[in-house]
Amino acid sequence: MNRMVSFSAASKDFQSGNYVRSLETLNTLLETQQDAKIYALLGRTLLQLGMKGDAALAYALAGDKAGESGVEFSRKAALLHFEVGNEDDALRLGLRHMMNHSLDAEIAYALASIYMKRGNNDLLSPFAKVLAESSNIDHTILAVRMLRTNPSDESQAFLARNLFKRFPNHIRFRLLYLIFSRHVSDLNTIRLHKPFIDKLLEKGETDFLKFETEFYNLQWCGSEELNILAGALNSLAPGQTAARHSAPHQWSQKIRVGYLSCDFFEQHATMKLIGRVLELHDRSRFEITLYCHTSAANLEASTFDRSQWGRVVEIGDLSDEAVAARMREDEIDILIDLKGPTFETRCQILNHGGAPIQMSWIGFPGSTGGTDIDYIIGDRFVLPDTSKPYYHEKFLHLPDTYQANDPVGRPKSKPASRAQFGLPEDKFIFASFNSARKITPETVDVWCRILRRAPDSVFWIMAASKASEANLREYFKKQGIPTNRIIICGHTDKYQEHIDRQQAADLALDTWPYNGHTTTSEQLWGGLPVLTLKGTNFASRVSESLLNALGLPELVAADVQAYEDMAVALYNERDRVTAFKQTIEDNRLLKPLFDAERFCRHLETAYEMAVERAKQGLAPDHFAVPALPERTVPFAAEAN
């Protein structure tokens, strides 16, 4: 009877707003009685007193005591833990709620937010639908961040379309809709909706760009001034970089280099570029560690002995903080992020101070905003001095090109006939093997003008899906190009076939504002000349860098009109195309583009120069690596 009276008194005090007296009474009660009702009122009282963390603990105990009937108490505890930043408790209670009851949008928001913060993007799929369908704008905005991680997922595409239908005037949902439209080459949709964005930019309204990731911004925007605004919601804590530079560090005779990526398997494009360079690192001067969060599925498909690249440390189950702590334990001198803000990245690990020198290379063609990086590895083409105002990173210029290439792991092209690929023997064949997201309406409009001026030609274009193929055919048809002049090829899992088929074309036409990167080097390796144009940011300057490194600077047009005119000129003067193909054959094993050994020596010099600055207590600064003498005899294209 006294317990009920005491509880009743506490309840009356709570109802009258005397929360302190209610708290005192409840604490006295808990000395002898612990049940769900008391803990629940304690949670409500603590919440009114602004003690959210303590309230969360009380609600969790109420849920435990109530058992099956305490669902709402445990749910409330999970949400309060999330609100105050107790992420582990929020996950534990939120996941328990999710397993035993239907998933609601608030719990989904808490769990997804934590997973995204921790880089666990592979755990997000259960939350996308409920968040996208929520009436809470914060929930749908989080859904936008989740949905853009994998545009090839049709369920995500469906949700993205529905979000745009529900909120047609909301810029975030329009940007998301355009991401999925680019992925399937829906050029008519892009042409319809992108002018809305263009008009905002013309009026000087750029604030919306901060909601777009750096990677997707590059698909359509070639302005460095605008590129740096993408992802601007992310920022470094004040003094973060200075604290990392001043932290105690033990240098050794060998330079300890750590590479961070989820792409450490031989089928990935990144390893087709840098694999041989990793093998060639001088182990008497460098210790190489691969911090790997490659998925189990990709590792199952891998047969290469990855120890040839370096010591592999699996970090998939570790938090960002734990990974950085492991790097400090390993006394890494230079940490290289190979992903940037791309799919499945964990570049935020760099914000936890893993190494005194931190760099970005190869995976992302631009500045990585909100990430603690000292240097970006580039060259004078992709990162000219005029770009410096748009980067917080210092420029580390390699002398030939920033892009490494593997002439050993990448297969050599074998003779192939046009008949093998359904190509006409008597036509001039323009080609594009770039991914759908790089193909813009503006680029295709120029391709159509070229085809109209080159009547005895066909266009051979890769489409990785049936949706892309149908959309491309429709767009070319609307531009007046007959269906029989457009030949579609699909993506092939047989890499040898991909290398072989490229030589069947006469001339590759590059995309902009996002060039072919690995695609361009593959085409050149396969013997196919690539026509590009001078770009305006890193992503649009890559082909220029590669062509110069192979001795073909004349295939870089000054502007769009020059690009169109040069394509038509080469169509009319086919002996010049033959000469370009011969130059590729002559230069492939002589010029720097595919010379992995030369590249490795330049890269190692860059590492040594950066370490020497750090040892002297000098802040990172722009610098260029001196070039080794040009080769006079071809290099070997097979392992020793």
Image: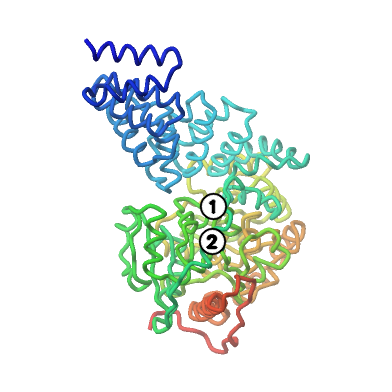
What percent of the width, then of the height, locates residue 10? 35, 16
Identify the image quadrant of the N terminus. Answer: top left
Identity, as a three-letter code, of the amino acid under mark 1: Ser
Q: CA distance from mark 1 to mark 2?
A: 9 Å
What percent of the width, then of the height, locates residue 231? 59, 47
For image coordinates 31% across by 29% down, the residue present is: 60
Q: How is the image coloured?
A: rainbow
What percent of the width, then of the height, locates residue 538? 64, 61
Task: Tell which of 215 and 619 is nearer to you.
Answer: 619
Locate residue 90 relative to residue 154 in the image: left or right. Answer: left
Query: Residue at label 1?
Result: 435
Locate residue 118 relative to residue 599 in the image: left or right. Answer: left
What secondary structure is marked by label 1?
loop
In the rendered image, is residue 410 in sight? Answer: no
In the rendered image, is residue 447 in sight? Answer: yes
Do the residues under discs 1 and 2 have CB atoms within 8 angstroms? yes
Q: Which mark is residue 519?
A: 2
Which image quadrant is residue 54 in?
A: top left
For image coordinates 70% across by 35% down, the residue present is: 196
Identity, as a three-letter code, of the amino acid under mark 2: Thr
What secondary structure is marked by label 2?
helix
Task: Tell which of 11 and 533 is nearer to you.
Answer: 11
As drawn, 174 above or below 216: above
Task: Tell which of 344 and 522 is nearer to you.
Answer: 344
Report the number of discs: 2
Label 2 environment density (alpha carbons within 10 Å; few <14, some 14–19, many ≥20): some
For image coordinates 62% across by 65% down, the residue present is: 543
**Label 1 vs 2, first from the N-terminus:** 1
